[in-house]
Amino acid sequence: MQNLKIRLFIFLLVSATTTICFAQCPTGDITITNQNQVNNFPQTYPNCHRLNASLFIDGTNVTNLDSLRQIDTIDATLSIFENLQLVSLAGLKNLKSVQDFSISGSPLLTNLKGLDSLKTATNSLVIGQMNGLESLEGIQAEYVRQFAILQCNKLTSLQGLDKLGRVSTFAITQNENLVSFNGVNPRLTFGDHFTINSNPKLVELANFENFDFVYNLDIRNNLVLNNLNGLRNLKRTFYFSLVNNPALENLDILTNLNTIELEMTIAKNAKLKSIEGLANVDASLLDSISIIDNVTLSMCSMKSICDFLKLEISRYNISNNAVGCNDKVSILAQCNTTSSFLEKSNDVTFYPNPATDFVYFKGLKGIRKLGIYHISGSLIQSIEVKGDELVLPTNHLGSGLYYLKPTDPQISPLKVMKLLVSH
């Protein structure tokens, strides 16, 4: 019995010793500042494959991370910062999981190959100030809580993000040459924040068709962004902000958006002429509306805005837009005028709308008189129609919203069309 106890003690001692040997990882954070420290990592920390602390790599003469191949898990932060001579991430090829991963200021890296095993960044993955980065090839992460790309000035698309399936926060900011979101996994889903900010060459939002909910949507300072087509299936958000996107002309693609539960902000969109895509938003759930400094926006009297402004407790800031959308009184006047009107005739087509000099009508069969009405409801002009088509000059009309409807006694007075004139 005594011998059995001795043998058991020896077994436990050997087991403990073996465990210690295979867990020779530091108890605190590690900072690597030169290539020798990288090369010596296997000798300094033999058999250390899982760090329960942070690893900071910050060295101007670090060229590769090959000697870090034993690491497969980092329970805290991996930060690769200002490594001016780093040419490869191949040394991270066995890294599978990290809490926070950030890489910045490594101008010789053109892609992110070497991260092929990294499936999860449980909190964040941030790529910033990587001026040599030409693609995101190498990113294999499928879930990231917070994902951000900022100041990567050679990126023209997001090629390489085809594996990323879910994020809570998605921020694409200050990427000078980013043109599109080509490369994004079209099944990507979101949770908290969707921020697209200061990408001066970004033309469109695409590959977000699976995107139906986000807590905070913020799209601002994108100088040539001219459509939001990728948001066609967005249904619900709490905060909705479109600010200083000077090429954006309408929000027609947002007709599925029916819930904004707190704040709507539409500001400084210089060419925005229509926000009718937001007509289906439930006004009773909105807390506040801000529509300001959209200098060509004259049409704000869609149902959602009308319903909201009629609420006694509504909080709003509506100012410095085009005539017709400058204040509550003028908007409600349009709401009251159009309350019994049909938005558009089903069998009459007309273009362009907005119009500058002319508007062309087709399908006027049976209509012989057409009235042009001011938003106040007063008749401005009566037009004789002599066929199925009509060319109507609009250069005599001031910029603003007008209503056109047949004035023939036999034609239903509900057949009404909205025409926006913009000079």
Image (cartoon, rainbow, N blue to C red):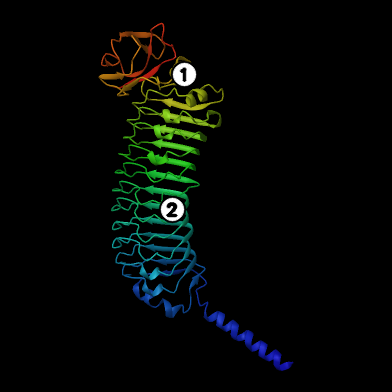
Residue 365 falls in image quadrant: top left
Whole-percent x, y for residue 243 in the image:
39, 36
Q: Could you tell me residue 343's position as x and y percent? A: 42, 21
Q: Quadrant of the N terminus?
A: bottom right
Residue 393 visible: no
Relative to residue 248, is residue 139 depicted above or below?
A: below
Q: Is residue 365 left or right of residue 341?
A: left
* Nearer-N-terminus badge (2/1): 2
SS at circle 1 = helix
For disc 2, the marked residue is: 147
Image side of residue 12 versus residue 360, left or right:
right
Front position in the image: 44 or 14: 14
Q: Which residue is mark 1?
A: 335
| 385 horizontally vs 292: left or right | left
Q: Position of residue 229 (x, y in %)?
A: 38, 39
Residue at coordinates 41% horizontally, 73% vertically from top-left? 69
Q: Residue farthest to the top?
A: 409
Vertically, is 48 above or below 180? below
As helix, strand or loop, the secondary structure at mark 2 comes to strand
Residue type at mark 1 is Cys
Q: Is residue 121 or residue 323 the one in the foreground?
A: 121
Q: Residues within 10 Å of mark 1 (few under 14, many from 20)?
A: many
Label 2 environment density (alpha carbons within 10 Å; few <14, some 14–19, many ≥20): many
Look at the image and tell me whether residue 340 can be seen.
Answer: yes
Q: Position of residue 419 (x, y in %)?
A: 35, 19
Which one is nearer the viewer's eye here, 325 or 353? 353
Foreground disc of the pair 2, 1? 1
Which amino acid lies under the numbered mark 2 shown in the image of this protein? Phe
